């Protein structure tokens, strides 16, 4: 599985934007970039995913570098509820075949602390 | 819409015992994945079930086994428990159709297993 590299921790102030980086220099052409987050005492939850183009949803934006070797998750206005561990994950495209359609390979993630 | 539920919430076992953990998938989902999360680590993929068969497995020994039932609920069984099996066990469900997977996985809150 292609690996991702994230900072161990980041801090932000409430209502400020947060940019969480992720490096994935060995990404393959069929890998999608997914972000999940895990709030304290909860299971992970899906945040966003993309392939090549930048993506936006109600939770966040995903900016993908042109060479796809890095990406950035953007929280436009951090709230205290956004304090969590954020995981950047590469995942085979569903049409790429293989036997682990549902497999998510989690790394250590980035611990985001949001200060009031 | 009912989310992913897991039971029990907490469990204490002794070394050498066997344990069964249960997961009810989200309505409309037909695929279940199981993950093990040790303290301070990201979740590790154990295996996935689709159409009542194991469909992909991570680096876990055969004493980790599972079942998926016709209603898509699932069980994780662990035999001959070891101290290192102490962890949070997460279940995730997703919807797979026509050979392709929908990308979003929905996680339950997990079962905290302690092996003494």
Image (cartoon, grey):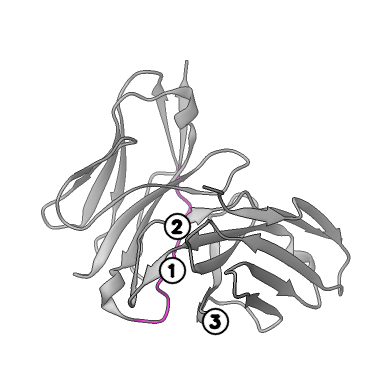
The residue carrying pointer 3 sits among few (fewer than 14), some (14 to 19) or many (20 or more) residues within 10 Å by Cα, namely: some
Q: CA distance from mark 1 to mark 2?
A: 8 Å
> In this picture, which residue range is highlighted in magenta?
A98-110
Query: Which labelled disc corresponds to residue B105?
Result: 2
Find residue A19 and report its image quarter.
top left
The answer to whether marks 1 and 2 mark residues whose Cβ atoms lie closer than 8 Å is yes
Camera-side residue of A57 and A105: A57
At 33% from the left edge and 76% from the top edge, which residue is drawn? B98
Tell if the residue under mark 3 belongs to the same chain as the one under mark 2.
Answer: yes
Secondary-structure class at tag 3: strand
Q: Chain of mark 2?
A: B
Secondary-structure class at tag 2: loop
Residue A39 percent location from the top left of the image? 53, 39
Residue B37 percent location from the top left of the image? 61, 57
At 68% from the left edge and 70% from the top edge, which residue is drawn? B75
Residue under numbered circle 3: B54
Q: Is residue A102 magenta?
A: yes
> Considering the image in quadrants, where does the C terminus of chain B appear?
bottom right
Q: Earlier in the sequence, mark 3 or mark 2?
A: 3
Residue under numbered circle 1: A102
Q: Is residue B69 magenta?
A: no
């Amino acid at each position: 599985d292609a690996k991702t590299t994230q900072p161990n921790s980041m801090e932000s102030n409430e209502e400020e934007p947060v940019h969480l980086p992720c490096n994935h220099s060995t990404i393959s052409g069929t890998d999608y970039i997914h972000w999940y987050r895990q709030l304290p005492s909860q299971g992970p939850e899906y945040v966003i995913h993309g392939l090549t183009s930048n993506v936006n949803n109600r939770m966040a934006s995903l900016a993908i570098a042109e060479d796809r070797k890095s990406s950035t998750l953007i929280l436009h206005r951090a709230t205290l509820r956004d304090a969590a561990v954020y995981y950047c994950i590469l995942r085979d495209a569903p049409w790429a075949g293989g036997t682990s359609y549902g497999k998510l390979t989690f790394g250590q993630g980035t611990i985001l602390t949001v200060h009031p | 819409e009912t989310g992913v539920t897991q039971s029990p919430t907490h469990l204490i076992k002794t070394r050498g015992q066997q344990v069964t953990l249960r997961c009810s998938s989200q309505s409309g989902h037909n695929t279940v994945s199981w993950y093990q999360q040790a303290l301070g680590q990201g979740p590790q993929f154990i295996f996935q079930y689709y159409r009542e068969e194991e469909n992909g497995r991570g680096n876990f020994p055969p004493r980790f086994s599972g079942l998926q039932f016709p209603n898509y609920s699932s069980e994780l069984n662990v035999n001959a428990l070891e101290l290192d099996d102490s962890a949070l066990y997460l279940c995730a469900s997703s919807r797979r159709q026509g050979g392709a997977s929908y990308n979003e996985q929905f996680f339950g809150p997990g079962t905290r297993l302690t092996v003494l």
